[in-house]
Image (cartoon, coloured by chain):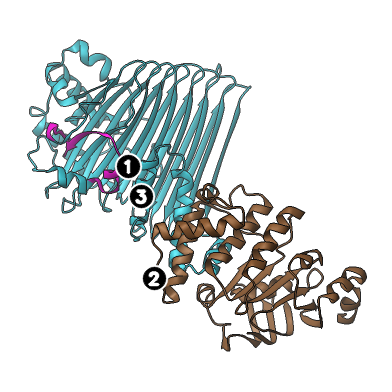
Chain colours: A cyan, B brown
């Protein structure tokens, strides 16, 4: 049944926004054509709402009332010292840095010239000069596509285009930093492309951080498209730490060639409303993924993790572990879909989603979905929600640890199990430090 | 000195009375063993001393160094020198042993009015105390007790005890799940802490542990009360005759 629905105020504003900025957004004629196509497609889709199954627990039509003006250019002054402040605990992670401020590339803040084996280019420049030949394989607007991704195509300003040479092995991670600065409340759309060549190995960290004093109000639409080559390894992390008001819409679309290894970790804290989508497709046999994450929500914050793992070919392995701490009226959503196609024999898939509920009013919605069409597979899923274990609390307190500190230690312990999945020790320490900051404790020296 | 006076305790949930007028005095510098059959109230006594929730003291008192502790929170008691070595030490996934030990030690030091230890000073202390218990730093970098064997868990309890320097040590079935070698290491760790200012309450089911940790006194606990008190030879007697006499008397 096709029902024409009245456009919401936000949907109208998006259309008007596009009219106003379309000419100023970067891109050749080919790119502009893609953008128009995308906004047309969005007009048909509208903001996703609860009657769209994938968005049942995160209704954007209800929750996105206003649309902020698009950040089509940026001249916010930002020094390296300020950047390090914005990075917080992540400043201690030794990495090659690629920096964007309010969705625009900033060469002066970056530091990746010695990243041997990696090519990094800002998307904005590439879009400006790109012919149809270049754009066609990168940007498409599929029928019935995701509304948020469609909006990303319409409004994207910049992002990192990262290519790792075949066989290259980077000693340090690439840190893609997206900083929000300045007092103007804006809507930012960025898109990244990551291509990891055959047998290459790299770690990429995507950080969404805020300069203290920046507008609390913000809307972000970030899409990262990843292709991991044959036998290659990508360790992929995202850290989004904000101040409790921002709208954060994130999509990672990942394809894996044969024998590839993909390990990801997503950390979210202080986000007003977040949707963390990860779509993973196994295209070649023998690939392995390990997806994990931790999220912290309180007040009326809402954090949604939605995973779609498509075992399209045989003999692949997937592991998922996500942990959320929910306080106040904080809400956590976990949707984990694992599809095992008819030919995907010898698939090995496991999923675990756990929430720690610290208040009576917290909410956790967990929806595992296993669609298995092959018969020789091992697949399992589990979900738990629990309060702090009183026996553990007593154990800590019997060692002299005061109640509030014991509680914090146990929350850290709960989250720590997920953080332990991160192989980079400096990143692990930074994530632990973020958790402690969230708990109102000073990070340990 | 520990003085337990006519202590009555019931389970908050069930309302069942477990300790029914237990009285016991343990002077500083002495080791007292509490022996008794299953269900006699041994573990309840241990938990009530440490201040676990779920138990209601309906009568009597517990005095430690002349001060009543029954209304104190578990962490306050720890700061006052009370330490319970658990029968089943808890695993804390995600918290490194060193982090746990340092948090505990500094919490206690703070409450005792002592300065917090710096990282190097703390590590030096842990290394020194750990060595005697065959616990190295690598083991403590792992999450607390996770994946530890029974013996490792008990040694880790004794290390905590050695670091926190309690004055009242309550050992709840410390011998359970230990083989002879582990039992020896754990007992040596405990014996090293024996001191004229320190009192020990050693709760055990079997006489075996008392060959290693030789008590000054042995008390038989049955049906929520101390039924008999004697020297270390009482433990040997019990090993032979069992608890039938006391459970019968109780019934």
Q: Chain of mark 2?
A: B
Dot 3 corresponds to which residue? A302
The quarter of the picture where residue B250 lies is: bottom right
Quadrant in which the N terminus of chain A appears: top left
The quarter of the picture where residue A315 lies is: top right
Dot 1 corresponds to which residue? A239
Q: Secondary structure at mark 3?
A: strand
| Residue A419 screen position, x and y as percent | 43, 44
B133 sits to left or right of A306: right
**What segment carries the magenta color?**
A87-108
User: Dot 3: within a 10 Å radius of its alpha carbon, few (fewer than 14), some, or many (20 or more) residues?
Assistant: many
Closer to the eye: label 2 or 3: 2
Dot 2 corresponds to which residue? B115
How many discs appear? 3
Q: Secondary structure at mark 2?
A: loop
Q: Secondary structure at mark 1?
A: strand
CB atoms of marks 1 and 3 within 8 Å: no
Q: Chain of mark 1?
A: A
CB atoms of marks 1 and 2 within 8 Å: no
| Residue A433 screen position, x and y as percent | 35, 51
């Amino acid at each position: 049944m096709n029902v024409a629905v009245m456009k919401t105020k936000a949907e109208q504003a998006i259309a008007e926004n596009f009219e106003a900025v379309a000419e100023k957004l970067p891109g050749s004629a080919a790119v502009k054509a893609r953008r128009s196509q995308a906004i047309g497609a969005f007009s048909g889709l509208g903001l996703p709402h609860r009657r769209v199954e994938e968005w049942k627990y995160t209704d954007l039509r209800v929750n996105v009332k206003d649309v902020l003006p698009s950040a089509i250019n940026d001249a916010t002054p930002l020094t390296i010292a300020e950047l390090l402040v914005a990075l917080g605990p992540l400043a201690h992670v030794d990495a090659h840095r690629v920096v964007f401020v309010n969705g625009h590339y900033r060469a002066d803040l970056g530091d990746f010239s010695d990243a041997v084996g990696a090519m990094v280019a800002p998307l904005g420049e590439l879009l400006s000069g790109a012919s149809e030949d270049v754009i066609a394989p990168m940007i498409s607007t599929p029928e019935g596509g995701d509304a948020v991704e469609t909006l990303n195509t319409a409004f994207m300003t910049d992002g990192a285009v990262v290519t790792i040479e075949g066989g290259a092995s980077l000693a340090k991670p690439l840190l893609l930093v997206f900083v929000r600065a300045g007092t103007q409340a804006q809507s930012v759309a960025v898109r990244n492309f990551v291509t990891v060549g055959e047998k290459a190995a790299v770690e990429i960290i995507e950080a969404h951080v805020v300069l203290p004093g920046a507008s609390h109000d913000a809307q972000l639409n970030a899409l990262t498209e990843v292709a991991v080559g044959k036998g290659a390894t990508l360790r992929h992390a995202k850290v989004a730490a904000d101040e409790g008001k921002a709208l954060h819409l994130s999509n990672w679309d990942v394809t894996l060639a044969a024998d590839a290894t993909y390990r990801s970790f997503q950390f979210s804290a202080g986000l007003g409303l977040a949707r963390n989508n990860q779509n993973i497709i196994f295209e070649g046999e023998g690939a392995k993924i390990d997806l994990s994450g931790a999220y912290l929500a309180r007040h009326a914050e809402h954090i949604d993790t939605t995973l779609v793992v498509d075992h399209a070919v045989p003999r692949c392995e997937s592991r998922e572990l996500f942990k959320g701490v929910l306080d106040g009226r904080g809400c956590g959503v976990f949707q984990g879909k694992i599809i095992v196609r008819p030919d995907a024999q010898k698939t090995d898939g496991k999923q675990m989603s756990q929430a720690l509920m610290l208040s009576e009013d917290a909410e956790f919605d967990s929806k595992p979905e296993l669609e298995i069409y092959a018969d020789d597979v091992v697949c399992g899923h589990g979900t738990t929600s629990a309060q702090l274990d009183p026996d553990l609390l007593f154990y800590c307190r019997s060692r002299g640890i005061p109640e509030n500190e014991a509680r914090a230690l146990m929350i850290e312990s709960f989250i720590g199990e997920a953080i332990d999945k991160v192989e980079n020790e400096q990143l692990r320490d930074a994530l632990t430090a973020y958790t402690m900051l969230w708990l109102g404790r000073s990070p340990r020296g | 000195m520990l003085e337990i006076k006519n202590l009555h305790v019931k389970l908050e949930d069930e309302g069942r009375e477990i300790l029914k007028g237990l009285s016991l005095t343990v002077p500083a510098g002495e080791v007292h063993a509490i022996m008794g059959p299953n269900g006699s109230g041994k573990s309840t006594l241990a938990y009530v001393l440490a201040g676990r929730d779920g138990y209601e003291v309906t009568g009597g008192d517990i005095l430690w160094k002349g001060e009543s502790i029954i209304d104190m929170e578990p962490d306050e008691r720890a700061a006052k020198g009370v330490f319970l070595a658990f029968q089943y030490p808890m695993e804390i996934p995600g918290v490194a042993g060193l982090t746990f030990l340092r948090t505990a030690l500094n919490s206690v030091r703070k409450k005792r009015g002592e300065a917090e230890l710096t990282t190097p000073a703390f590590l030096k202390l842990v290394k020194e105390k750990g060595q005697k218990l065959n616990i190295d730093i690598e083991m403590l970098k792992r999450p607390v007790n996770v994946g530890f064997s029974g013996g490792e868990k008990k040694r880790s309890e004794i290390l905590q005890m050695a670091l926190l320097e309690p004055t009242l040590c309550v050992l709840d079935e410390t011998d359970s799940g230990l083989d002879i070698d582990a039992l020896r290491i754990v007992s040596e760790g405990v014996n090293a802490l024996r001191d004229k200012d320190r009192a020990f309450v050693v709760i055990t089911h079997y006489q075996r542990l008392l060959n290693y940790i030789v008590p000054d006194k042995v008390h038989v606990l049955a049906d929520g009360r101390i039924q008999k008190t004697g020297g270390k030879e009482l433990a040997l007697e019990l090993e032979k005759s069992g608890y039938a006499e006391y459970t019968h008397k109780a019934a």
